[in-house]
Amino acid sequence: MKKTLDDWLNAYGESHQHPVNKAIHRICVPVIYWTVFAMLWALPVPDAMMPWHFRWAWLGVIVIAIFYGQFGWRPSVVMTSYTLANILVVWLWETWMSLPLMWGAIGLFILAWIGQFWGHRIEGKKPSFFKDIQFLLIGPAWVLKGTRQK
């Protein structure tokens, strides 16, 4: 039987029970999510695709829409909107910051993953994605759901 989004969120939550680990994840997961789209945005684009304003990050938006679409239109709309909001912040960084986007994203990505692994050390459990790589896509929804419930 196919897992529901609640099944995925509950399974993800099993290895995120310690309050410190939860707090770390509420900070680090959105940072990692943003940095992935920032790095995709910053990747070079073939000249032939420039007239269409193509960025590799747009393929990531499609992946998110399809992945969450399997759980219904609401999760797909919420996560696609969240992703687009992240891309807006990426664009703002690129427009206004003097630090190159790729270098800033790489630095934040590394720091956030260090935080994640520190949180799991406190928790005493391995990260969920060691069981199933799809948990990397579930983490942001878990954070959003936890934020909404407060």
Image (spheres, grey):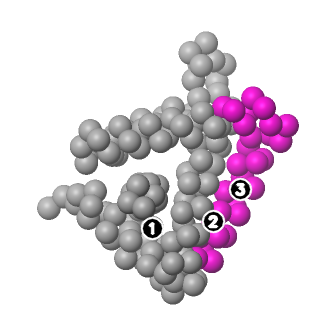
Q: Residues within 10 Å of mark 1 (few under 14, many from 20)?
A: some
Tell me which residue sits at (71%, 63%) in the image. 111
In this picture, residue 24 sits left or right of residue 137: right
Left or right, 138 with reference to 31: left
CA gap, disc 3 and disc 2: 9 Å
The span picked out in magenta is 91-119
Magenta includes 114? yes
Q: Which amino acid type is marked by label 3?
A: Leu
Sequence-wise, the earlier of marks 3 and 1 is 3
Name the quadrant of the N terminus: bottom left
Q: Secondary structure at mark 3?
A: helix
**Residue 123, image x and y in percent?**
51, 83
- Asked if residue 92 lies left or right of residue 142, the reply is right
Q: Which mark is residue 108?
A: 3
Q: Is residue 148 visible?
A: yes
Residue 106 vs residue 72, the one in the foreground: 72
In percent of width and height, residue 68 lies at 33, 46
| Residue 110 included in the magenta stretch of the image | yes
**Residues at marks 2 and 1, CA–CA distance in whole angstroms:** 13 Å
Name the residue tied to disc 2: 113
Q: Which residue is mark 1?
A: 129
Closer to the camera: disc 2 or disc 1? 2
Tell me if residue 52 comes above or below residue 112 in the rendering: above
Give me the C-alpha separation between circle 3 and circle 1.
Answer: 20 Å
Q: The C terminus lies in which quarter of the figure?
A: bottom left
At x 60% / y 33%, what residue is drawn?
A: 88
